[in-house]
Image (cartoon, grey):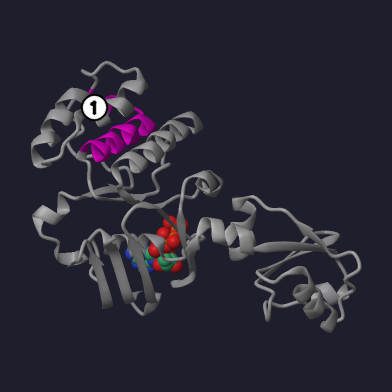
Amino acid sequence: MSTMIECRQLRHSYGDTPVLHGLDFRVEEGGIFGLLGKNGAGKSTAINILMGFLRPQSGECRVLGHPSHALPPAVRQDIGLLHEGFIQYDFMSIDEIERFHAPFYPRWDRSAFYDLVDQLNLPRSRRVSRMSCGQRSQVVLGLIMAQNPRLMILDDYSMGLDVGYRRLFLDLLRDYVRERGTTVLLTSHVVQELEKLIDRMIVLQAGRVLVDCTRADFMARFRQYRLPRSGATDALRREGPVVNVERNLHSVSVFGYADRDTMAAHLSAHGVAVDALEEVPMGFEDAFIGLTGRA
Ligand SMILES: Nc1ncnc2c1ncn2[C@@H]1O[C@H](COP(=O)(O)OP(=O)(O)OP(=O)(O)O)[C@@H](O)[C@H]1O
């Protein structure tokens, strides 16, 4: 298994404002990796460095073994980039844009393009500039799939896609990755959709890696406990086993990796009555919000 992406001590600032504070993570070959985080966590900055649009101010970012800001053309052919759904040459029609891109990529697979794009039920003679935002996104995603790259970097793949087309794309992507062994790093703001999609997750918070593990491991270990709200629960802070506290009108949710006994002991030591402590099952979106906070 080879390393597809390696970031070591990546730092970046905009002016005097540091945004990435020494990011360390690796993406090994095969599977779908989610790069997650709240608004402003630093995902786009990291992706821009990975895509070679930004040069890291310090640290190292290697993609397919090469510095990301100096990828040789032959290596670029192995990387499929989705950057804000941007499509060049939108004066071309669907079939022209497919034929235009094909010669640049030695493993071009036009059937992968049409598997996705034909489902739009548009004539192949339709110009890209005359499509809706979501339809254009499908064309871009189709081009990336036809490229048959070893690595796909999909920044906010869901942009402009309605719920049905998102499902269509994700179903195709899952099968595609399984059949071809492609490695995918993606970001999305539609976190609940990632529950069935991503194998590993890297969660950024304020420019640092907060979590780097498999989704299954995170879901098995991360827990939510609920308690009636009181003066003692209002005083709870993020410390010890408490990763986050969210206060509602009458109840408090406490999040962390600790088992019930460990959490109860910590809460008791802080004056919280734990007789009504209950563990609340969570879906992926609940757990993500529990980890990173609502606001
Ligand atoms: N060009 C820029 N100049 C100055 N500050 C910037 C610039 N781009 C981003 N930032 C700041 O850097 C921080 C990280 O932004 P970034 O876009 O990387 O976050 P993000 O995780 O992608 O957020 P979002 O989910 O909202 O897209 C934010 O505080 C943002 O305001």
In percent of width and height, residue 151 lies at 27, 52
Which contiguous range is marked in magenta? 127-146
The quarter in which the N terminus is drawn is bottom left
| Residue 82: image location, x then y, percent | 30, 47
Is residue 232 on the magenta stretch?
A: no
Write down the residue under mark 1. Answer: 111
Is residue 295 visible in the rendered image? The answer is no
Residue 227 appears left or right of 5:
right
Q: State whether residue 156 is above or below residue 245.
A: above
Disc 1 marks a residue whose amino acid type is Ser
247 relative to 101 in the view: left or right:
right
* Residue in the image at 32% along x and 39% along y: 179
Q: Secondary structure at mark 1?
A: helix
Measured along the vertical axis of the image, is residue 123 above or below residue 239?
above
Q: Which is nearer the eye, 114 or 126?
A: 114
At which x and y percent is residue 193? 52, 43
Q: Residue at x 36, y 33 (%)?
A: 133
Q: Quadrant of the C terminus?
A: bottom right
At 64% from the left and 54% from the top, the residue drawn is 286
Q: Residue furthest bottom?
A: 269
Position above or below: 128 against 292: above
Other-residue count near label 1 (Cα within 10 Å), few / some / many at <14 / 14–19 / ≥20: few
Q: Quadrant of ligand 1?
A: bottom left
